Image (cartoon, rainbow, N blue to C red):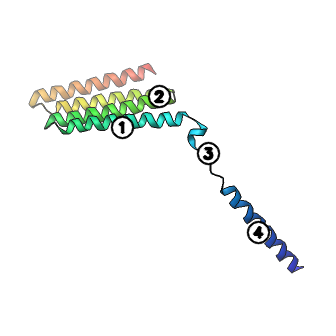
């Protein structure tokens, strides 16, 4: 009886081992076969990255404070473009809010960077104006909800 159980166990084990590799050999479908928009989305992200890289290369030719402002603007445009792409791909309130927040944050970062070029009272005034503009924009976003 024990021999019969052992033979039965071995037979079942071999059948299971034979089934698993056959299923494992079937490759999953390519994501593009499932949803062609995945390919379009990837191509759009690559275009955004290439555009950003070209803009950053132009910034390398600059010097001093203008260079840092240029870099902030190039990276900001990239962030906004990616947020817009996400909103286009999957329109939702959350993505719309994320896009609006990204625009406000990028504009604020650029304004702060531009203010850093100034001196004394002019710089303080510029910083307070940038902060006030950001506060207004964020209040407008909340009111728009």
Query: Label 4 crowding class (10 Å Cα cut-off): few <14, some 14-19, many 20+?
Result: few
State which tag comes first along the sequence, 4 or 2. 4
Cα separation between marks 4 and 2: 51 Å
State which tag comes first along the sequence, 4 or 1. 4
Number of numbered discs present? 4
Looking at the rendered image, the disc whose residue lies closer to the viewer, 3 or 1, is: 3
Looking at the rendered image, the disc whose residue lies closer to the viewer, 4 or 2, is: 4
In the image, what residue occupies the spot 28% across and 29% down? 108
Query: Label 3 crowding class (10 Å Cα cut-off): few <14, some 14-19, many 20+?
Result: few
State which tag comes first along the sequence, 3 or 1. 3
Query: Label 1 crowding class (10 Å Cα cut-off): few <14, some 14-19, many 20+?
Result: some
Quadrant location of the N terminus in the rendered image: bottom right
Cα separation between marks 4 and 1: 51 Å
In-image side of 48 versus 123 (left or right)? right
Residue position marked by numbered label 2 in the rendering: 87
Q: What number is the disc on residue 14?
A: 4
Q: Nearer the viewer, residue 29 or 100?
A: 29
Query: Label 2 crowding class (10 Å Cα cut-off): few <14, some 14-19, many 20+?
Result: some
State which tag comes first along the sequence, 4 or 3. 4
Check contact, mark 1 vs mark 2: CB within 8 A: no
In the image, what residue occupies the spot 82% across and 76% down? 6
Element under label 2? Answer: helix
In the image, what residue occupies the spot 36% across and 34% down? 79
Check contact, mark 3 vs mark 1: CB within 8 A: no
* Residue 130 in which image quadrant: top left
In-image side of 53 versus 82 (left or right)? left
């Amino acid at each position: 009886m024990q021999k019969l159980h052992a033979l039965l166990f071995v037979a079942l084990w071999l059948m299971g081992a034979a089934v698993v590799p056959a299923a494992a050999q079937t490759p999953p479908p390519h994501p593009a076969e499932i949803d062609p928009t995945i390919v379009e989305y990837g191509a759009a992200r690559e275009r955004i990255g290439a555009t950003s890289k070209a803009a950053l290369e132009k910034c390398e030719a600059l010097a001093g404070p203008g260079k840092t402002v240029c870099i902030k603007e190039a990276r900001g445009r990239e962030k906004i473009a990616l947020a817009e792409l996400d909103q286009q791909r999957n329109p939702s309130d959350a993505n719309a809010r994320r896009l609006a927040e990204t625009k406000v944050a990028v504009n604020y970062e650029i304004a702060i960077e531009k203010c850093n070029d100034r001196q004394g009272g002019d710089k303080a005034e510029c910083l307070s104006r940038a902060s006030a503009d950001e506060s207004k924009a964020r209040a407008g976003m909340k009111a728009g909800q």
